[in-house]
Image: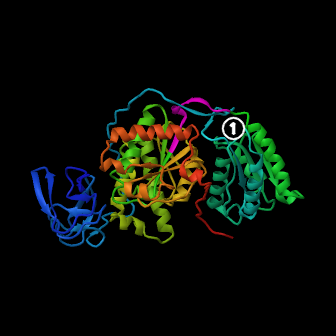
Amino acid sequence: MQDFLKINENDNVVVALNTIPAGTEIAVETPEGTKNVTSLEEIPAGHKMAVCDIPEGGEVIKYGYRIGNAKEAIKAGNWIHTHNVKTALGDLLEYTYNPTPVEEQTTEDVTFMGFNRPDGKVGVRNEIWVIPTVGCVNNVATAIAKKANEFVKGSVEEVIAFPHPYGCSQMGDDQEHTRKILADLINHPNAGGVLVLGLGCENSNIDVLKPYIGEYDENRVKFLVAQESEDEIADAVEIIKGLIDYASGFEREPISVSKLVIGMKCGGSDGLSGITANPLVGRFSDLLISKGGTTILTEVPEMFGAETILMNRCANEELFHKTVDLINDFKNYFKSHNQTIYENPSPGNKKGGISTLEDKSLGCTQKSGSALVKGVLAYGERVKTPGLNLLSAPGNDLVAATALAAAGAHIVLFTTGRGTPFASPVPTMKISTNSRLAGKKSNWIDFNAGVLVEDSTMAEETKKLFDYVVEVASGRQVCSEAAGFHDMAIFKQGVTL
């Protein structure tokens, strides 16, 4: 394994793959030829070292793009991090559509073993979901799922409750978003049956929620109002027995991967995120799209600084303008709450070697691969167009992963350099950026992309990841599922009454 990596020929930094001690001489390829640079101080793994002198105010270049400006004069061999580089980003910006030519490819179809639903949708799981309309019945929903799991049979895999603290005391768009997310989950094809559990007096009660759900199969979706039942747990379990009978009639069968929808998210990023795991997910995205499939990229604040790359890959000018609105609407959300737009990266990101939001965003957006943007989705909107889609949601791991599931993702690919055990309503596959994390937290990590800077190639790992996703779509559990973890979180944006 080499000790450093220069990502783009125009970069004026290299990334340390292992800690580089002070006084170490390295040979760096530049447009002018090979140049020997001696480290003037220790460079931690994942962090950056200057390979040429950078004047105060000069641009720091990584991935071939500016990731910030030097706060002070930086010498070749210096460690570059938050102490000597700052963001160069402003607030609201003007954008021009400069389409990037993209050659769309078609590759041979592959099948996975999934569940065909009567409405034409497909699922990768056959679970029974208990969806509370309001946080007041969270514990009841959990108790119902625990008791009902005794009756699981056939192809039904598990009864799962998804507690959340919302559904009442909300106003305006905040309440609308809660209703949309709940309705999206009720309609999700990974659930072979759904019990919607209401309290009865909440703002988003069952009668209010039904128009958001739309047409539904009465065999698949059932409702229970706790205030109208003498024993809501016993009544719910009886209802779920019927849902299990219904859902157990579905069996796995071969389905084209063109039906798959995969969400893409990262968290706990480090200096290798933009070198290993994120580019790998981007290559996976391109491969799935070439087979007619769909991917969704979210966490809008972590597009700031790299947004023009996505804008210029929009398939048409209408999508370009939607992407501009996606970015600026989120910036205005920050401003409306008197918060700094660029209050990012997190302490964990910085410890891992990420210095500015541009540094983070240019790594994060690599999950989008090189495909054209075919759709731009509002929060709570379901995906309609095959190909690469952008989804409005924050960077928060649980909120963003839930938003991906609500948008229609069957599986979420989650890249991480720090590690996390969380789950979402759908299988959430953890992809490590480095082998140290994969070895230490094998109970969290499903796939190790760290081998890309060791002894494997991008082509080899893309195929392995694609095959792994097909296995997960066909029923293989990811680590968080095997641990029994199931999380959801709704984007809270408004006043609480």
- Which residue is drawn at the image coordinates 10% and 52% (left, top)? 34
Residue 342 in percent (x, y) is at 40, 66
Dot 1, how many residues are within 10 Å of its Cα: few (below 14), some (14-19), or many (20+)? some
**Residue 216 percent across, percent down from the top left:** 73, 40
Q: Position of residue 67 (x, y in %)?
A: 29, 60
Can the viewer see residue 391 in this picture? yes
Kind of residue at badge 1: Ser
The picture quadrant where one finds residue 282 is top left
Quadrant assignment for the C terminus:
bottom right
As rendered, which of 163 and 319 lies closer to the eye?
163
The residue that label 1 is drawn on is 155
Magenta-drawn stretch contains 465: no
Above or below: residue 285 compared with residue 306: above
Residue that appears at 81% across and 59% down = 200
Magenta range is 251-262
Q: Is residue 316 visible?
A: no
Q: Nearer the viewer, residue 404 or 333?
A: 404
Q: Residue furthest right?
A: 230
Q: Is residue 342 above or below residue 147?
A: below
Describe residue 4's horizontal placement relative to residue 257 as left or right: left
For the residue pair 31 and 467, the one nearer the viewer reads as 467
Is 261 within the magenta?
Answer: yes
| Above/below status of 64 relative to 217 | below
**Left or right for 323, reference 152:** left
User: Residue 352 sits in which quadrant?
Assistant: bottom left
Q: Position of residue 231 (x, y in %)?
A: 87, 58
Q: Secondary structure at mark 1?
A: loop
Residue 152 located left or right of residue 58: right
Residue at 58% in and 64% down? 493
